Image (cartoon, grey):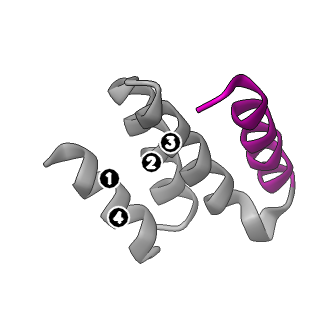
Amino acid sequence: MRTAQYQEVKTVAEQCLRDPALKVEGYLIRGRLAMANGDAAGARTEFERAIVAAPGDRVALEARCQLLF
């Protein structure tokens, strides 16, 4: 991912985190960015945050499962 694209996506994630209705999506975006950069620990942290924010969110649970397996 180009640096400009990375920054743009990171900015979108931060905007999502400021909106309670989009908080889970913000964590998921940050987790996927971490995965794209080879940071499995960072991705796991973000996916766990998404699950804490919305325990029944299927997408968050799937993201964590994909990372673990």
Question: Is disc 3 in contact with disc 2, using a CB cutoff of under 8 Å?
Answer: yes
Question: Is disc 1 in contact with disc 4, using a CB cutoff of under 8 Å?
Answer: yes
Give the residues drawn in magenta, as a range. 1-18
**Residue at which label 3 appears:** 31
> Which amino acid, mark 2?
Phe
Question: Is disc 4 in contact with disc 3, using a CB cutoff of under 8 Å?
Answer: no
Percent position of residue 11, x then y: 83, 40
Label 1 neighbour load within 10 Å: few <14, some 14-19, many 20+: many
53 vs 35: above or below: below
**Residue at which label 4 appears:** 61
| Location of residue 9 (image quadrant) | top right
Percent position of residue 42, x then y: 45, 27
Count of labels in the image: 4
Q: Residue at x 77, y 71 (%)?
A: 21
User: Which image quarter is the N terminus in?
Assistant: top right
Answer whether residue 47 is magenta in the image.
no
Q: Is residue 8 left or right of residue 36?
A: right
**Residue at which label 1 appears:** 64
- Rounded to the nearest angstrom, the CA distance separating label 3 from label 1 is 9 Å
